[in-house]
């Protein structure tokens, strides 16, 4: 039998810890943002300041549930296409999760290293900017993001559940969920989307045209691919293809993580009042901003 990957070991460990953790005890706050104690510690956050990024690190930044596992898969396929070597995750790929010694171990890892993160722009270690690592920032419309987040909590048996969708929605709007407020995350990144070495990608655009999205990602990170390679990679990166392999790639949590992969699932849960509340929050936080336009809110959250 194939050896379980470190990636799956880490997920299983976090799930095991989650079993004994009530929702009321799930979070600890670091610099004003709630993080799950099953995945993050203040010691690791302290050690993160010493993390030394490289110019060829591949940084993937996103709020939870915006498709980071999708992009991780695409990036590892790109690395494979170029190097012909399967990208083995030597550590759990979320930069801020794990034990404080991980940053020492990461010094030994060959380039390119993939660093996924859910951190706000201003919480990233300074060496990422100093050493000019490229950052792909992935966004998804806030309504589908919230619905995906809710299902993850309430469908995965070992993760603490919310009493109801209404309860989750209240906490989401207050930013009392893992990695804090979607809107604070968005406001924070909004100012930097046109900075050098930063590229914005929208989940919904990738969903609409996967091949075009893969091409853009490849170009941004400097991978050269043939049209045929892009087509093959697209076929392997659809929701259905990834869900079918999810137990192999992500262990028991796989089918919950690759749940539905659709645009507009929010229509099944949002009440009219909740729609109005989120529309007002969007307006307050992002209307008239560059990110506000890039998210195409009218198309994906109001149609
Ligand atoms: N290939 C592909 N196509 C379309 N959608 C996909 C794909 N891969 C993952 N997903 C969907 O992304 C959602 C999970 O997001 P994340 O991977 O960022 O989750 S996590 O924060 O790391 O837990 C989750 O969304 P929902 O299905 O709406 O819950 C996944 O299904």
Image: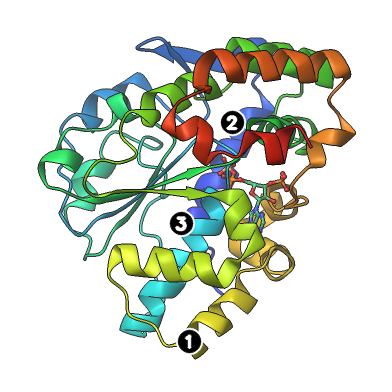
Residue at x 20%, y 42% (from the top left corner)? 128
Residue at x 66%, y 13% (from the top left corner)? 280
x and y percent of residue 66 in the render?
58, 42
Q: Residues within 10 Å of mark 2 (few under 14, many from 20)?
A: some
Residue 88 visible, this angle: no
Q: Secondary structure at mark 2?
A: helix
Q: Which residue is mark 2?
A: 17
Q: Which residue is mark 1?
A: 227
Q: Quadrant of the N terminus?
A: bottom right
Q: Quadrant of the C terminus?
A: top right
Q: Nearer the viewer, residue 170 or 177?
A: 170
Q: Secondary structure at mark 3?
A: helix
x and y percent of residue 123 in the render?
30, 25
Q: Is mark 2 in CB contact (under 8 Å) with mark 1? A: no
Q: Which circle marks residue 260 in the picture? A: none
Q: Marks 1 and 3: which is nearer the front?
A: 1
Give the spatial CA distance, label 1 vs label 3.
33 Å
Residue 292 visible, this angle: yes
Give the spatial CA distance, label 2 vs label 3.
17 Å
205 horizontally vs 150: left or right: left
Q: Residues within 10 Å of mark 1 (few under 14, many from 20)?
A: few
């Amino acid at each position: 039998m194939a050896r379980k990957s470190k990636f799956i070991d880490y997920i299983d460990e976090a799930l095991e810890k989650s079993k004994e953790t009530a929702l009321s005890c799930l979070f600890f706050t670091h610099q004003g943002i709630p993080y799950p104690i099953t995945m993050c510690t203040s010691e690791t956050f302290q050690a993160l300041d010493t993390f030394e990024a490289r110019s060829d690190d591949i940084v993937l930044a996103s709020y939870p549930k915006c498709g980071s596992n999708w992009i991780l898969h695409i990036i590892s396929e790109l690395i494979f296409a170029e190097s012909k070597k399967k990208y083995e995750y030597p550590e759990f790929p979320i930069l801020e999760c794990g034990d404080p010694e991980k940053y020492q171990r990461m010094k030994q890892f060959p380039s390119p290293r993939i660093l996924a993160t859910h951190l706000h722009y201003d919480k990233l270690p300074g060496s990422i900017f100093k050493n000019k690592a490229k950052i792909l920032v992935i966004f998804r419309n806030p309504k589908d993001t919230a619905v995906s987040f809710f299902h993850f909590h309430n469908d995965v048996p070992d993760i603490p559940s919310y009493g109801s969708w209404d309860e989750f929605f209240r906490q989401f709007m207050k930013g009392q969920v893992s990695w804090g407020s979607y809107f604070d995350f968005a406001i924070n990144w909004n100012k930097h989307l046109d900075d050098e070495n930063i590229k914005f990608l929208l989940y919904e655009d990738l969903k609409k045209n996967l091949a075009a999205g893969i091409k853009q990602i490849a170009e941004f990170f400097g991978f050269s691919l043939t049209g045929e390679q892009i087509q093959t990679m697209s076929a392997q990166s659809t929701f259905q293809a990834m869900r079918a392999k999810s137990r192999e790639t992500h262990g028991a949590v796989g089918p919950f993580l690759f749940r539905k992969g659709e645009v507009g699932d929010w229509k099944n849960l949002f009440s009219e009042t909740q729609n109005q509340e989120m529309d007002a929050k969007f307006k307050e936080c992002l209307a008239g901003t560059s990110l506000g336009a890039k998210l195409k809110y009218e198309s994906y959250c109001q149609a």
